[in-house]
Amino acid sequence: MDSIETAFAALSHRMARLPMPARAPRQPESIASLLARVDAARRCTGPGARR
């Protein structure tokens, strides 16, 4: 059982040293695009919507 704990500890240390991946910055969306997405979601979940 000790070998599993040793292997897990070694793996944890190796993972902690890895650099965090950098996220690409998001482009801002226009208000019209955001409103269109909200409207589409509302239509899909509203009364009488097909599933």
Image: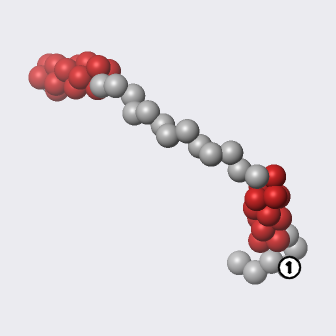
Q: Which residue is mark 1?
A: 48
- Residue drawn 81% across the image and 58% down it: 32
User: Within 10 Å of the Cα at label 1, are there few (<14), some (14-19), or many (20+) other Cα atoms?
Assistant: few
Relative placement, left or right, of 29 versus 32 is left
Relative placement, left or right, of 28 versus 32 is left
Residue 48 vs 13, above or below: the answer is below
Q: Quadrant of the C terminus?
A: bottom right
Q: Quadrant of the N terminus?
A: top left
- Residue drawn 75% across the image and 81% down it: 50
Q: Amino acid at mark 1?
A: Gly
Q: Looking at the image, which is closer to me, 14 or 32?
A: 32
Residue 51 appears in the picture as rendered: yes
Q: Position of residue 19 (x, y in %)?
A: 34, 25
Residue 50 vs 9, above or below: the answer is below
Q: Position of residue 45 (x, y in %)?
A: 79, 68
Q: Position of residue 14 (x, y in %)?
A: 23, 23
SS at badge 1: loop
Q: Position of residue 38 (x, y in %)?
A: 80, 59
Residue 48 vs 12, above or below: the answer is below
Residue 8 appears in the picture as rendered: no
Q: Looking at the image, which is closer to me, 44 or 7?
A: 44
- Residue drawn 50% across the image and 40% down it: 24
- Residue drawn 71% across the image and 50% down it: 29
